[in-house]
Image: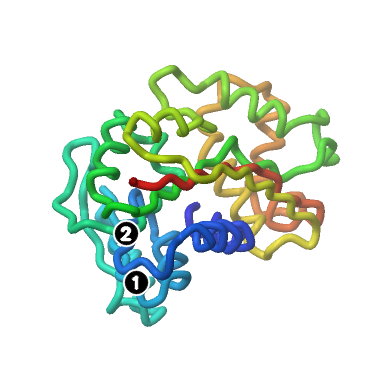
């Protein structure tokens, strides 16, 4: 899912990296990718800030293995290292960094304020923290898809919102108050609007299908039988599946914050 997101949203990733780069004072020597996942941000950071050293931190060993393989294939292994750590359990032993990046990861933390304080302590004076978050789940389909009742995707998103409990991670948080409490000076906030129309990137069908397959199990008691049957058709490999539709789009918004350690 993370790799497909980066492939489909490549223009957004390039745009936000350029935005972060506009706020840096020269090339940072050491860069931290917190909650690196499969390394899409790690690679983007290494390319954007050559020849900086990039440290990818994630709790999942499988994700770290994917990062190692990815950077080796791209010839970046000499500048990228990984650290396995669940920051909810304890902060890893890290040397100070000049730039920290956290994309779609802080809302997963049990105590974001503690993580912000630890990021503040890890940054060199004058260092920057760049945070990015999805404002909501992406949309892929037109209102009427030619099957079932119009508005299927709207009902899916409403069901997802209903299914999310108060203890689950929330999408679209405003991190500015947390940044200020941690001691950061917020330099910039920006909303990125993603609107990709046909012809969309080739991976869009797989991306949309991976998303809907991920959420499908939790919607069995939230949607009617007709909607569930249409979802199953979309998630198949027939002519009406997401893999073969010519009417796919990608709509999403994401918000970025850039904050400095005085």
Q: Secondary structure at mark 1?
A: loop
Image location (x, y in percent) of residue 101: 40, 53
- At x 47%, y 66%, the residue is 44
Check contact, mark 1 vs mark 2: CB within 8 A.
yes
Image quarter for residue 99?
bottom left
Q: Secondary structure at mark 2?
A: strand
Depth check: 19 or 137 in front?
A: 19
Is residue 121 in sight in this rendering? yes
From the viewer's perspective, is the residue at label 1 or at label 2 nearer?
2
- Alpha carbons under labels 1 and 2: distance apart: 10 Å
Location of residue 120 (image quadrant): top left
Q: Residue at x 82, y 36 (%)?
A: 143
Q: Which residue is mark 2?
A: 98
On screen, residue 206 above or below 86: below
Task: Residue 31: give its label.
Answer: none
For the point 64% across and 42% down, the residue is 253
In front of the other: 101 or 65? 101
Could you say which disc has been placed on residue 52 in the image?
Answer: 1
* Image coordinates for residue 133, horizontal then vertical, percent: 51, 42
Q: Is residue 88 above or below residue 195?
A: above
């Amino acid at each position: 899912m993370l790799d497909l997101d980066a492939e489909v949203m490549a223009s957004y990733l390039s745009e936000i990296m350029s935005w972060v780069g506009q706020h840096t004072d020269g090339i940072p020597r050491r860069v931290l990718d917190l909650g690196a996942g499969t390394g899409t941000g790690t690679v983007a950071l290494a390319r954007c800030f050559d020849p900086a050293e990039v440290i990818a931190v994630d709790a999942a060993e499988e994700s770290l293995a994917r990062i190692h393989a990815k950077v080796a294939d791209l010839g970046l292994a000499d500048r990228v290292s990984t650290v396995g750590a669940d920051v909810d359990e304890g902060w890893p032993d890290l040397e100070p960094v000049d730039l920290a990046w956290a994309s779609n990861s802080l809302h997963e933390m049990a105590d974001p304020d503690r993580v912000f304080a630890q990021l503040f302590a890890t940054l060199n004076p004058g260092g920057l923290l760049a945070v990015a978050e999805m404002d909501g789940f992406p949309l892929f389909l037109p209102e009427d898809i030619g099957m079932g009742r119009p508005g299927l995707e709207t009902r899916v998103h409403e069901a997802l919102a209903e299914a999310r409990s108060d203890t689950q991670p929330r999408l679209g948080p405003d991190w500015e108050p947390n940044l200020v409490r941690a001691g950061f000076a917020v330099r910039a906030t920006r909303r990125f609007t993603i609107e990709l129309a046909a012809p969309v990137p080739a991976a869009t069908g797989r991306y949309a299908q991976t998303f809907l397959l991920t959420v499908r199990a939790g919607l069995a008691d939230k949607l009617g039988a007709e909607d569930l049957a249409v979802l199953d058709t979309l998630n198949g490999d027939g002519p009406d599946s997401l893999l073969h539709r010519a009417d796919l789009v990608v709509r999403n918004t994401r918000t970025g914050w850039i904050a400095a350690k005085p």
